[in-house]
């Protein structure tokens, strides 16, 4: 049994979360800024510039009893991150399959009333929706290939707490 849903895999090395290093973590997923918002002469707000990608930046932070195994990891290193932050997509009524925006570690399919439905995953991020699903949502933990921007480690010697923070950007 894992202490967290978070996974950090150093490409070519494996898992980097030793016991007691990943409990009660927090994670943000923020779209990477692209383009700029400008007002037209009529006062309407429009987005101008490059809008060619849909990538995330993330900050993961935690206070526990140990740190992740980040030895040898520096700015630019590649990690496979099993996120604790969920992404959610709308599933319209009558749809029998839907493609997720990102690869999923786990997913939950539920209708507007909150009733949970079983869903089957297929190849290439496709999810098969059971019939007669009345419409609702898919919520899932994405698996992202991310590059290390920065990280820091901290220790409170007398409080016996160890903290860490990892700044990442989707490749």
Image (cartoon, grey):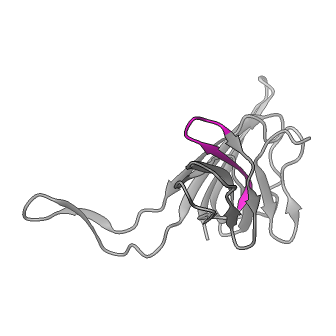
Examine the structure image and report whether residue 105 is included in the region drawn in magenta: yes
The total number of labels drawn is: 0
Instruction: State the residue at coordinates (48%, 73%).
Output: 53
State the image coordinates of residue 109 (x, y, percent, origin top left).
Answer: 66, 48
The quadrant in which the C terminus is found is: bottom right
Most common secondary structure along the magenta stretch: strand
Q: Residue furthest front?
A: 132
In the drawing, does residue 21 fall left or right of residue 119?
right
Instruction: State the residue at coordinates (81%, 49%).
Output: 68
Per the rendered image, the range of residues in magenta is 104-115
State the image coordinates of residue 159 (x, y, percent, origin top left).
Answer: 77, 23
Instruction: State the residue at coordinates (52%, 55%).
Output: 92
Examine the structure image and report whether residue 17 is included in the region drawn in magenta: no
State the image coordinates of residue 114 (x, y, percent, origin top left).
Answer: 61, 35
State the image coordinates of residue 119 (x, y, percent, origin top left).
Answer: 73, 54
Instruction: State the residue at coordinates (80%, 69%).
Output: 11
Q: Is residue 93 or residue 156 the one in the foreground?
A: 93
Toward which corner of the image does residue 39 lie, by quadrant? Answer: bottom left
Q: Residue furthest left?
A: 42
Q: Is residue 163 or residue 6 the one in the foreground?
A: 6
The quadrant in which the N terminus is found is: top right
Please say if 146 is above or below 83: below
Please say if 114 is above or below 141: above
Toward which corner of the image does residue 66 lie, by quadrant? Answer: top right
């Amino acid at each position: 049994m894992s202490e967290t849903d978070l996974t950090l895999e150093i490409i070519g090395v494996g898992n980097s979360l030793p016991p007691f290093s990943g409990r009660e973590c927090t994670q943000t997923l923020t779209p990477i800024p692209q383009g700029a918002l400008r007002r037209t002469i009529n006062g309407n707000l429009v987005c101008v510039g490059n809008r060619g990608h849909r990538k995330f930046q993330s900050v993961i932070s935690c206070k526990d009893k140990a740190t992740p195994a980040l030895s040898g990891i520096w700015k630019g290193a590649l990690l496979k991150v099993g996120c604790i932050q969920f992404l959610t997509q709308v599933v319209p009524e009558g749809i029998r399959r839907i493609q997720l925006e990102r690869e999923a570690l786990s997913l939950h399919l539920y209708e507007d009333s909150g009733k949970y439905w079983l869903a089957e995953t297929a190849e290439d991020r496709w999810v098969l929706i059971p019939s007669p699903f009345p419409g609702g949502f898919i919520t899932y933990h994405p698996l992202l290939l991310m590059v290390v921007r920065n990280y820091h480690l901290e220790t409170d010697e007398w409080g016996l707490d160890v903290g860490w923070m990892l700044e990442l950007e989707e490749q």
